Image: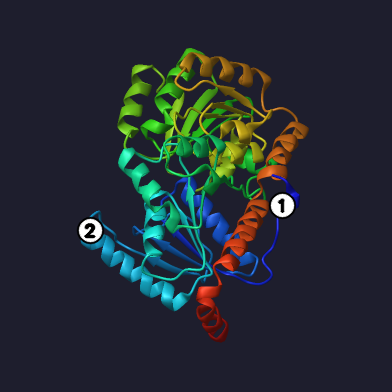
Amino acid sequence: MDQSRLGRHAGPMRIMLLVTCLRLGGAEQQVAALARKYVALGHAVCVVSLLPGCEVELPDGIETIMLTMRKTPAAMLAALMQVRRFVLRWRPDVVHAHMVHANLFARALTRICPVPATVCTAHSYFQGGALRMLAYRLTDRWGDLTTHVSDEGRQAMIAVRAAPEKRIIVIPNGIDTATYRPCAQTRAATRAALGLRETDRLVLNVGRLVWEKAQADLIDAFAEISPAPGTTLMIAGEGPLRAALAQRIAERGLAASVRLLGQRQDVPALLNAADLFVLSSRIEGMPLVVGEALACGCPVVATDASGVAALMGNAGTTVARGDPAALAGAMRDALARGRGESSDEAARHQHIASAFSIEAIANEWLRLYATYARAGAAPCMEAVDATARCH
């Protein structure tokens, strides 16, 4: 990202982050990372989730609203009125929505409630079928700006007329490079906890166990490389395909060398412990975990899903989606090269830190918030004055 484009709002802002849910996914983790950074920079933040439950780490002290919205007109209207009451009380300068349901909800909110600025962010290459794309198209003018986390995703939305070319831009996800960084001590401790010897090789995948992540292709590719003793594949994540993947592991005769770790809270440590990270996905928006792996200094092999090329640059190896043989070849070559020296790890970390740090991305968002909030501030000046008096 061109650092000259970054800017800071002249004063603290009131930022409402609206999300579909707060499960342990890439989009949700990005929302939490932005919330933490905004609070650290002195801005007021609230988070509104359309569904209950929270699996991500949010900053202490921020106001959080958990709805229980159902897919019925009456339930949606009730949720809109509940959020309208909150907006009129909290008076945000900007509502920033993330993921398709929250994006459409935020646009509908503008019909019943004054908001100085509304920004909607799409996180996946595939946003849904024809009805969702029609809903995006019909409500586009109700928001101020639509963004996507990758250029491929942006182009896809333009192609299906979900957003006009002039009203959708790319803002990538940001990586917390203070949390995700090479650490020899963490690597040694985590490998010991996993039962790995110094000479063992660990191949790691992190992601929900769903069709889009294509871990079955990864298992097939791992079987094809005929892993030597001491080479282990570990898959961190949970999801509906766990039983099917366990069966595939057994059918491939890999029970001794492939482990399903379940949901983990120590992903930075796992990425430090790994000798190779592999992304096997069919569909992505911009896979945060690829950037996180590189930031931890770990070599990466990834499919050419949306957003991968921009993240990887020349720092890793990309192969075609849905081709276990190509994935196997790239894995074999990467394992032969190894993790490399500390200078190689530092170079991968710097590749991410220089272009995708959460600090840079947060400041880019703040610049956009300020631009659109100022443009729409005149009708809402009374709300701004009230906020100043109360806070």
According to the picture, the residue beneath numbered tag 2 turns out to be 73
Name the one closer to the observer, 267 or 253.
267
**Is the residue 36 above or below the residue 173 in the image?**
below
The answer, for residue 192, to whether it is visible in the render is no
- Residue 189 quadrant: top right
Quadrant for the C terminus in the image: bottom right
Name the one closer to the observer, 116 or 325.
116
| Mark 1 crowdedness (10 Å alpha carbons): few <14, some 14-19, many ≥20 | few
- Residue 81 quadrant: bottom left
Looking at the picture, which amino acid does disc 1 mark? Arg
According to the picture, the residue beneath numbered tag 1 turns out to be 5
- Give the residue displayed 59% in from the left and 33% down from the top: 274
- Specify whether 132 is left or right of 201: left
Residue 199 in percent (x, y) is at: 63, 25
- Residue 19 quadrant: bottom left
Element type at mark 2: helix
- Specify whether 75 is left or right of 67: left
- Give the residue displayed 71% in from the left and 38% down from the top: 351
Looking at the picture, which amino acid does disc 2 mark? Pro
Q: Which mark is residue 188?
A: none
